[in-house]
Image (cartoon, coloured by chain):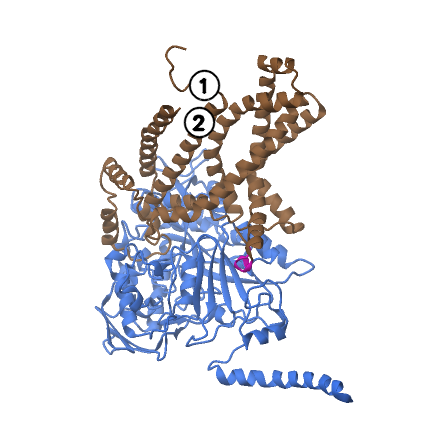
Chain colours: A brown, B blue
Amino acid sequence: MRPYLIRRILYLIPTLLGITLVTFLLLKMIPGGPEDALFSVDTPIVRDAGELARFRAEHRLDQPVLVQYLHWLGRVARLDFGRSFRDHRQVRTLIRERLPHTLLLNVAALGLMFTLSLPLGLLSAVARGSWYDRLSGVLLYSLYCLPNFAVALVLQLLLAMHWNLLPLQGLESLDADRLGGIGFLWDRFLHLLLPTICLTYGGLAYLARFSRAGLLESIRQEYITVARAKGLSETMVLLKHALRNSMIPLLTLFGMLVPALISGSVIIERIFSWPGIGRLFFTAIEGRDYPLIMGLSTLSALLSLGGLLAADLLYAWADPRVAYRRRGSS
Amino acid sequence: MGRRGAAALLRPAATGLFAVLLPLVSACSAPVPGPEPGDWLVIPVSSEPESLNFVLAGNTPAKWIGRLVADSLVDHDENLRLVPRLAASWEFSDDQRTLTFRLRDGVRWHDGAPFRAEDVVFTYERIVDPASGPNSKRSQFREVERVEAPDHRTVRVTYGQPYAAALYAWQIPILPKHIFESEDFLTSSYNRRPVGTGPYRFVEWKTARQVVLEANRDYWGIRPSLHRIVFRIIPSRNTQYQALLAGEVDLAVLPPERWQELRDRSEPGPWKFYRYSTLRIAYIAWNGNGDHAALADPRVRRAFTLLIDRREFVERVMLGFGEIAASPFHPALSAHDPDLAPLPHDPQEAGRLLDAAGWKIPAGGGFREKDGDRLGFRLLTSSGTDWQEKFSVLLQESFGRAGVEVRIRRVEYTALAAQVRKGAYEAAVSTWGLDIDPDPFPFAHSSQIGGGWNLAAYRNAEVDRLLEEGRRILDSDRRDQIFREIGDILARDQPYTFLFFFSVPLAIDSRFENVKFSPLGFFDWYPGILDWYVPEGRRKYGRSGSGQARSPDADRDQMN
């Protein structure tokens, strides 16, 4: 397994290089540059031509694109992602301030998705063809179709405004600093609920039906018949044998969900005033804040590739049939 | 009566005596009497401040916080008149090239150090320093030769030539030299935790969540009555609205329909409703650089303005939240000419003008033509702005009826700015946040074509001369006269069609008293929100921040 792991991690490098290069090129192709966002965009002033020239020279904006890219790469190799054009702070500081909040939201959503979808799928598979199976199918597909900003607004209106059950927005209450340990955690938890629900429900349909399909597939395998023949209870058959094998397609899905979640949470973060990196990305693009955009894109690429790698490794763990090491002729 | 009876009488008597004496005592100790401080004001903002370095940062939250944490030398009052702030007085020399400020005594920075003229010089130096990077304040100081501090209480500014807008420039917040001189100005940690001389001290900035300010008890001026001001960062306007309804914020800018709805409810909610005009102007820029034959002709541009029914648009789409503009001068400014009426909506006259310019409707109908060319243009608007989307469609319709073809191109805002700056456009709809100094030099003088703000590539020798003269005349009446002449010529030539000035629908929690507006907003004047207060019985946030209204006695105990 270890050589496989090392090989996979090494493959990350050219993949990342390719992604960052393409992102960089695309960025430079977008009409408008930082000078259009930074130099008093909307109040007419007497323009100082020297100011613009100085800015472009300082940030090498007039050099060939590839030269600019290599320069960026050289700094990144030293873990220096540069400073934001907007407030001159280190890109890594800006990301560090907000990334934990986005991660928390996404991990919570992923966790909730898996926790709910596995039993849902399991029950559907076991009770195949029943009213439960059909009803849950219809409900889940309906949920999948609902756009998440609409659901967010409706939930805000009902749960926060009308029934006053959950907070409307934000990470914490105004006076959160005065709450004790447990109070503080509870406050955070309540604030986390609504945005997490909005990120979760869509994926539920996907995952639940997938796990149902995977389970049905594995139930038909010969080893299940063998297990039953051995006299194991149906529960044992399901949990010990069928489940583990049905998780394989789920794991690949997991890897693909990570990047989708990170980009999908931009809208939810905005609606719930969640201080994550989604909004940062958005403002950075508007402002053509190249260092920040490159930093965020690289991070996003890393997380996505990491998710895919994790999925592959879990895949190997779940299915011993997958041989990662050559043992002579097999 | 007995002891218990006597005691029962004593307590209310003592309280009564106390209640009478306390205001007298506090009036004696506080140099500037005002309502007792307390309660918080929670304001939602859509984006974070760029930073809290008030020289470098320019977005609205940064400017608002800058007004509270820092002071400027001068400011504007409710009626847009210049009033002293850190400068107790000022005067121009006889040749009008030197402006001398006499600064107030006894002003201290929030860290206790004394405020001095050197701080003003330092702030100026940082603004004009090229190493400070892109900076919108720099252009206001272009005419300055040097700034000196002959002593700790005097600042002397020398201009190359008399400069009319000299005083306007000194509305910038002043930064502390003793703190920044040993720091990297661009990356200092003080850009996140500012120190100023202003009525509010900085408390904390939780990135992307909130900025908290607390009243400065040692402020040299009007004691603020609100104990804390909290800026909550809520990116979505709709969530801001919900937060207002939920009582999580104390004021909100509402979409016009919501504002009307809430205001006209049969059961009034706990809000008061205001509208205020702003210096933000909506305009259409016509590229007159000659590439497009029709747009270079003032008759055609005039006709185009006559085709637009601004009144209808403001009434129907903006629900009345706009003031039609005849010129770039806001009606509240003295430069505004009350006798200059905006061009009316007159499609007939427009047709006549277009015919006279040679653009006639061909025999079979359709779009107007001249020498085989069709009359039409590409209209750039920025995507994602509701009023612009509606406006561009209405424009296309009404122009179409008059035989003019409008092709709408919706572009992302920064891309629009890029195209327009390069002159690579035909017509563009956009907005400007105009300055309180009405000088139209940046967008009307021929020297500002190509990379500057003269987007319309407008060249008029008479206007150029007037603009140059206007920059030199300190006498405000004469200057206004010049602006009016300029306004007349611009109205005749229509290099830009000035559409309207935006008004803002605002709802504020009704517990706040003494809410006043300048013609241009509730924030951008002095003292502005410093005058607001909440009567003791109606306070929502105690000084320690709990969300419940506290009893008057508890508040009083806290303060002693």
Residue lying at the far bottom of the rendered structure: B1
- Is residue A313 in sight in this rendering? yes
Residue B379 belongs to the span the image colors magenta: no
Element under label 1?
loop
- Whether tag 2 and tag 1 are in contact, CB under 8 A, the answer is no
The answer to whether residue A164 is left or right of residue B232 is right
- Give the mark nearest the N terminus, 2 or 1: 2
Q: What residue sits right under mark 2 in the picture?
A: A313
The answer for which chain carries disc 1 is: A
The spot of residue B187 in percent (x, y) is 31, 56
The spot of residue B23 in percent (x, y) is 56, 83
Q: Quadrant of the image for the N terminus of chain A? A: top left
The answer for which chain carries disc 2 is: A
Q: Which of B430 and B170 is in front in this view?
A: B170
Q: Residues within 10 Å of mark 2 (few under 14, many from 20)?
A: some
Q: What residue sits right under mark 1 in the picture?
A: A322
Q: Nearer the viewer, residue B534 or A325?
A: A325
The magenta segment: A173-179
Amino acid residing under circle 2:
Leu
Q: Nearer the viewer, residue A204 or B325?
A: A204
